[in-house]
């Protein structure tokens, strides 16, 4: 009886959370329309809170570090997952996490042991060799499994009284994103077919995806993306190359053309943007407009597909988005159409 009652309580809380998420999604566009015009760069003018968690996956004897950027309030919020690149950590791409939280998203940054900063930290020799070894199919599988474990845990955390994420998660509004190796992780979770295993890692709980520095398979690229069924956004730059792997700017751009006509898809190519800019690292020579454009298009995409904000959709496909770009930047999009 106690177990049954507890389950009923959890089910009730999930139902209430789903209703709150639906109300927020329906009402947000109307509330915003009554105020200022749509601006994806507009955010709260104070800092956002964050919490660090470690999720123990007992089945794989693996611990997954997380950093969660928290939006204001205590209501359920849409979730954006972020997977770091090779050698990164949950602390990377902070500019994205802070802005998304300030815009009302629960931003969950996942760290992947085996392809994270532990690969190179403390090494004075052989760093590049270690990094190359870590960029393996095995680690891609581990990364995808990490994301699924986190997704599985959301409902428990949402229902658990006293947990930092208790009552904070919109379980039916979740986006997946990542940079570089994290983009590969994102692509697999969001519907790309992988050699030998197909769509094994596709997760139906994901509503939309953003791949920063995406990767295209060297063989049968178009077939790999044929069954993608959720909206995708792709971001790269004209200097988006790294010494590990065989991706070029051209192969990164092949992903957009390989995506099926049955989904909404977007592609940004920033002029002279290097690989590291998408992960948050900048230098004196980094164009400051790059992060502004990345934040604006990222936010509008999530607003359109996780908050169902029609004004965000109009903004993405209108002149307002293009006005943020510099003359040599490239921006294209294609809307889904019915497939016979």
Image (spheres, helix red, strand yellow):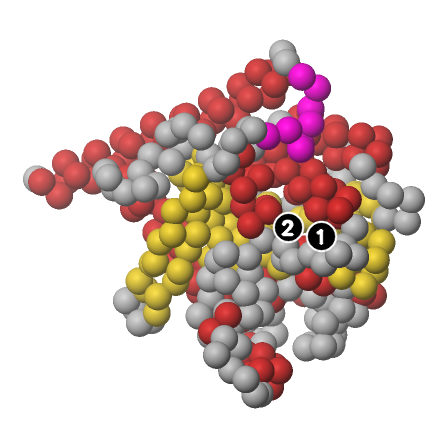
Assess whether residue 41 is covered by the magenta stretch: yes
Q: Is residue 32 left or right of residue 226?
A: left
- In terms of secondary structure, where does tag 1 sit? strand
Looking at this view, is 96 or 144 the one in front?
96
Residue 41 in the image: state x and y as whole percent. Answer: 67, 33
Q: Is residue 236 visible?
A: no
The quarter of the picture where residue 17 lies is: top left
Is the residue 118 above or below the residue 296 in the image?
Answer: below
Query: Which is more toward the observer, 173 or 114?
Result: 114
Around disc 2, counting alpha carbons within 10 Å, would you say few (fewer than 14), some (14 to 19), or many (20 or more)? Answer: many
Image quadrant occupied by the N terminus: top left
Q: Mark 2 or mark 1: name the one nearer the start of the chain.
A: 2
Q: Tell me the quadrant of the picture where the C terminus can be found.
A: top right
**Residue at 72% over, 41% down:** 292
Q: Quadrant of residue 281?
A: bottom right
State whether residue 263 is above or below residue 112. Answer: above
Q: Is residue 98 visible?
A: yes
Q: Inspect the magenta stretch and tell me whether residue 291 lies in it.
A: no
Q: Which residue is mark 2?
A: 210
Magenta region: which residues? Answer: 36-43
- Tag on residue 234? 1
Q: Percent from the top left, x then y, of residue 219? A: 74, 75
CB within 8 Å, label 2 to label 1: yes
Q: Nearer the viewer, residue 317 or 161?
A: 161
């Amino acid at each position: 009886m106690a177990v049954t009652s507890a389950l009923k309580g959890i089910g009730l809380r999930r139902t209430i959370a789903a209703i709150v998420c639906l109300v927020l999604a329906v009402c947000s566009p109307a509330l915003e329309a009554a105020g200022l015009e749509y601006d994806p760069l507009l955010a709260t003018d104070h800092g956002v809170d964050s919490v660090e968690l470690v999720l123990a996956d007992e089945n794989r004897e693996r611990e997954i570090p997380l950093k969660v950027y928290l939006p204001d309030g205590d209501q359920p919020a849409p979730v954006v997952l972020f997977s770091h690149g090779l050698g990164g950590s949950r602390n990377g791409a902070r500019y994205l996490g802070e802005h998304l939280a300030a815009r009302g998203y629960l931003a969950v940054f996942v760290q992947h042991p085996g392809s994270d900063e532990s690969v190179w930290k403390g090494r004075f020799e052989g760093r590049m060799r270690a990094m190359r070894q870590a960029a393996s199919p095995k680690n891609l599988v581990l990364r995808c499994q990490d994301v699924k474990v986190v997704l599985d845990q959301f409902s428990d955390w949402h229902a658990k009284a006293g947990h930092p994420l208790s009552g904070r998660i919109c379980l039916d509004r979740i986006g997946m994103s990542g940079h570089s190796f994290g983009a590969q992780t994102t692509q697999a979770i969001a519907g790309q077919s992988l050699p030998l295993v197909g769509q094994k890692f596709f997760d139906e709980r994901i509503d939309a995806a953003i791949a920063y520095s995406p990767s295209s398979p060297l063989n049968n690229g178009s077939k790999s993306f044929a069954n993608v069924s959720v909206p995708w956004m792709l971001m790269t730059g004209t200097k988006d190359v790294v010494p590990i792997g065989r991706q070029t700017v051209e192969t990164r751009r092949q992903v957009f053309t390989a995506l099926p006509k049955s989904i909404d898809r977007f592609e940004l190519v920033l002029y002279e943007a290097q690989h590291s800019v998408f992960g948050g690292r900048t230098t004196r020579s980094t164009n400051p407009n790059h992060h502004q454009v990345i934040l604006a298009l990222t936010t509008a995409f999530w607003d359109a597909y996780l908050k169902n904000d029609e004004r965000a959709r109009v903004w993405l496909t209108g002149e307002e988005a293009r006005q943020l770009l510099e003359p040599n930047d490239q921006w294209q999009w294609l809307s889904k159409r019915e497939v016979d």
